[in-house]
Amino acid sequence: MHEQVVVQMSKMLRNLEGMLAKAAAFAEAKGCAPDSFVGFSLAPDMRPLSFQIQAASDTAKFAVARLTDVEAPSFPDDETTLDQLRERLAKTAAFLEGVEAKAFEGAEAREVRLHFLPGKWVRGDDYLREFALPNLYFHVSIAYALLRMAGVSVGKLDYVGSMKLHDDPA
Protein backbone atom coordinates (compact mmCIF):
# COMPACT_ATOMS: atom_id res chain seq x y z
CA MET A 1 0.00 0.00 0.00
CA HIS A 2 3.02 2.27 0.46
CA GLU A 3 3.45 2.45 -3.34
CA GLN A 4 -0.15 3.54 -3.92
CA VAL A 5 -0.21 6.08 -1.12
CA VAL A 6 3.27 7.52 -0.73
CA VAL A 7 4.76 7.02 -4.17
CA GLN A 8 1.69 7.80 -6.29
CA MET A 9 0.27 10.58 -4.16
CA SER A 10 3.58 12.40 -3.70
CA LYS A 11 4.15 12.11 -7.46
CA MET A 12 0.79 13.75 -8.16
CA LEU A 13 1.49 16.52 -5.64
CA ARG A 14 4.89 17.20 -7.21
CA ASN A 15 3.28 17.19 -10.69
CA LEU A 16 0.76 19.73 -9.42
CA GLU A 17 3.57 21.81 -7.95
CA GLY A 18 5.19 21.80 -11.40
CA MET A 19 1.96 22.97 -12.99
CA LEU A 20 1.82 25.88 -10.55
CA ALA A 21 5.42 26.74 -11.49
CA LYS A 22 4.33 26.85 -15.14
CA ALA A 23 1.44 29.13 -14.12
CA ALA A 24 3.86 31.53 -12.43
CA ALA A 25 6.13 31.56 -15.51
CA PHE A 26 3.10 32.08 -17.77
CA ALA A 27 1.95 35.05 -15.68
CA GLU A 28 5.42 36.58 -15.73
CA ALA A 29 5.66 36.20 -19.51
CA LYS A 30 2.22 37.78 -19.97
CA GLY A 31 2.87 40.57 -17.47
CA CYS A 32 -0.04 39.63 -15.25
CA ALA A 33 -0.23 38.88 -11.54
CA PRO A 34 0.44 35.17 -10.92
CA ASP A 35 -1.56 35.21 -7.72
CA SER A 36 -4.73 36.10 -9.63
CA PHE A 37 -5.00 32.37 -10.50
CA VAL A 38 -5.49 31.51 -6.82
CA GLY A 39 -9.11 32.69 -6.83
CA PHE A 40 -10.14 31.16 -10.17
CA SER A 41 -13.01 28.66 -10.18
CA LEU A 42 -14.72 26.70 -12.95
CA ALA A 43 -18.24 27.70 -11.92
CA PRO A 44 -19.80 30.11 -9.42
CA ASP A 45 -20.68 27.27 -7.06
CA MET A 46 -17.23 25.62 -7.21
CA ARG A 47 -14.31 26.26 -4.91
CA PRO A 48 -11.25 28.15 -6.25
CA LEU A 49 -7.79 26.94 -7.19
CA SER A 50 -6.48 27.56 -3.67
CA PHE A 51 -9.04 25.12 -2.27
CA GLN A 52 -8.22 22.50 -4.91
CA ILE A 53 -4.56 22.60 -3.84
CA GLN A 54 -5.45 22.51 -0.14
CA ALA A 55 -7.84 19.60 -0.69
CA ALA A 56 -5.23 17.63 -2.67
CA SER A 57 -2.74 18.23 0.13
CA ASP A 58 -5.24 17.23 2.83
CA THR A 59 -6.35 14.13 0.95
CA ALA A 60 -2.77 12.87 0.69
CA LYS A 61 -1.64 13.62 4.23
CA PHE A 62 -4.84 12.31 5.81
CA ALA A 63 -4.65 9.13 3.72
CA VAL A 64 -1.29 8.44 5.34
CA ALA A 65 -2.64 9.24 8.80
CA ARG A 66 -5.76 7.12 8.38
CA LEU A 67 -3.84 4.13 7.04
CA THR A 68 -0.93 4.24 9.49
CA ASP A 69 -0.18 5.43 13.01
CA VAL A 70 1.68 8.45 11.63
CA GLU A 71 0.19 11.81 12.58
CA ALA A 72 -0.45 14.19 9.69
CA PRO A 73 0.98 17.70 9.90
CA SER A 74 -1.50 20.53 10.34
CA PHE A 75 -1.52 23.24 7.70
CA PRO A 76 -3.88 26.22 8.01
CA ASP A 77 -5.84 26.82 4.82
CA ASP A 78 -4.61 30.40 4.48
CA GLU A 79 -2.52 30.36 1.31
CA THR A 80 -3.13 33.37 -0.93
CA THR A 81 -0.25 33.11 -3.41
CA LEU A 82 1.00 30.54 -5.91
CA ASP A 83 4.30 30.38 -4.03
CA GLN A 84 2.51 29.55 -0.77
CA LEU A 85 0.47 26.86 -2.51
CA ARG A 86 3.62 25.40 -4.08
CA GLU A 87 5.28 25.37 -0.66
CA ARG A 88 2.30 23.53 0.82
CA LEU A 89 2.49 20.89 -1.91
CA ALA A 90 6.23 20.48 -1.35
CA LYS A 91 5.76 20.12 2.43
CA THR A 92 2.98 17.58 1.94
CA ALA A 93 5.01 15.52 -0.54
CA ALA A 94 8.02 15.61 1.81
CA PHE A 95 5.82 14.39 4.67
CA LEU A 96 4.54 11.49 2.56
CA GLU A 97 8.01 10.58 1.35
CA GLY A 98 9.21 10.41 4.95
CA VAL A 99 6.80 7.58 5.81
CA GLU A 100 8.38 4.15 5.54
CA ALA A 101 6.71 1.16 3.91
CA LYS A 102 6.56 -0.74 7.20
CA ALA A 103 4.16 1.89 8.57
CA PHE A 104 1.54 0.54 6.14
CA GLU A 105 1.66 -3.05 7.42
CA GLY A 106 -1.94 -4.13 7.98
CA ALA A 107 -3.33 -0.96 6.41
CA GLU A 108 -5.54 -2.94 4.00
CA ALA A 109 -7.69 -4.24 6.87
CA ARG A 110 -7.53 -1.12 9.03
CA GLU A 111 -10.85 0.46 10.03
CA VAL A 112 -10.95 3.95 8.56
CA ARG A 113 -13.52 6.38 9.92
CA LEU A 114 -14.46 9.57 8.11
CA HIS A 115 -15.93 12.46 10.10
CA PHE A 116 -18.61 13.09 7.47
CA LEU A 117 -19.92 9.50 7.76
CA PRO A 118 -20.67 9.16 11.48
CA GLY A 119 -21.29 5.63 12.71
CA LYS A 120 -19.66 4.11 9.61
CA TRP A 121 -16.21 2.83 8.73
CA VAL A 122 -14.47 1.46 5.66
CA ARG A 123 -11.59 -0.99 5.26
CA GLY A 124 -8.25 0.61 4.44
CA ASP A 125 -7.99 -0.94 0.99
CA ASP A 126 -11.52 0.17 0.11
CA TYR A 127 -10.86 3.66 1.49
CA LEU A 128 -7.76 4.04 -0.68
CA ARG A 129 -9.41 2.69 -3.84
CA GLU A 130 -12.88 4.23 -3.44
CA PHE A 131 -12.15 7.57 -1.79
CA ALA A 132 -8.56 8.70 -1.25
CA LEU A 133 -7.14 8.16 -4.75
CA PRO A 134 -10.27 9.32 -6.62
CA ASN A 135 -10.52 12.39 -4.39
CA LEU A 136 -6.87 13.28 -4.96
CA TYR A 137 -7.23 12.85 -8.73
CA PHE A 138 -10.41 14.95 -8.70
CA HIS A 139 -8.77 17.95 -7.04
CA VAL A 140 -5.60 17.69 -9.14
CA SER A 141 -7.77 17.48 -12.28
CA ILE A 142 -9.80 20.54 -11.30
CA ALA A 143 -6.59 22.48 -10.61
CA TYR A 144 -5.28 21.35 -14.02
CA ALA A 145 -8.52 22.49 -15.69
CA LEU A 146 -8.37 25.88 -13.96
CA LEU A 147 -4.82 26.45 -15.19
CA ARG A 148 -5.77 25.39 -18.74
CA MET A 149 -8.79 27.72 -18.60
CA ALA A 150 -6.41 30.55 -17.65
CA GLY A 151 -4.26 29.82 -20.69
CA VAL A 152 -1.36 28.10 -18.93
CA SER A 153 0.36 25.64 -21.24
CA VAL A 154 0.03 22.45 -19.23
CA GLY A 155 -0.70 19.12 -20.85
CA LYS A 156 -1.40 15.52 -20.01
CA LEU A 157 2.27 14.77 -19.36
CA ASP A 158 2.33 17.55 -16.75
CA TYR A 159 -0.59 15.80 -15.07
CA VAL A 160 0.57 12.19 -15.45
CA GLY A 161 4.28 12.82 -15.02
CA SER A 162 6.94 10.21 -15.55
CA MET A 163 6.39 6.47 -15.63
CA LYS A 164 8.62 3.60 -14.59
CA LEU A 165 9.58 2.40 -18.05
CA HIS A 166 11.54 -0.77 -18.72
CA ASP A 167 13.59 -1.77 -21.75
CA ASP A 168 12.51 -4.76 -23.82
CA PRO A 169 14.93 -7.66 -23.55
CA ALA A 170 17.57 -7.61 -26.27
Image: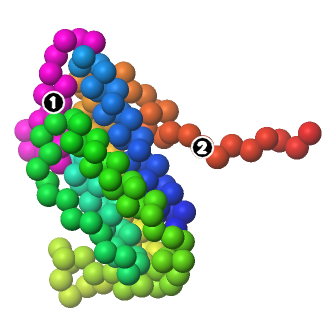
Image x and y of residue 56, in percent: 29, 53
What residue did someone put label 2 on?
Answer: 163
Q: Position of residue 157 (x, y in %)?
A: 49, 33
Query: Residue 15 is drawn in which quadrant?
Result: top left
Q: Residue at the far right: name it.
A: 170
Q: Is residue 96 left or right of residue 83?
A: right
Q: Position of residue 42 (x, y in %)?
A: 18, 36
Neighbour class for label 1 at 10 Å: few (<14), some, many (≥20)? some
Question: From what the image shows, is residue 64 above or below residue 153?
Answer: below
**Badge 2 amino acid:** Met
Q: Circle 1 sits on which residue? A: 35
Which residue: 17% across, 48% down? 51
Write down the region rendered in magenta: 29-51
For this orientation, the residue located farthest to the left is: 44
Q: Residue at x 12, y 40 (%)?
A: 80
Left or right placement of residue 30 versus residue 77 in this view: right
**Labels 1, 2: front one:** 1
Residue pictured at 17% horizontal, 74% vertical: 116
Q: Magenta stretch: residue 41 in it?
A: yes
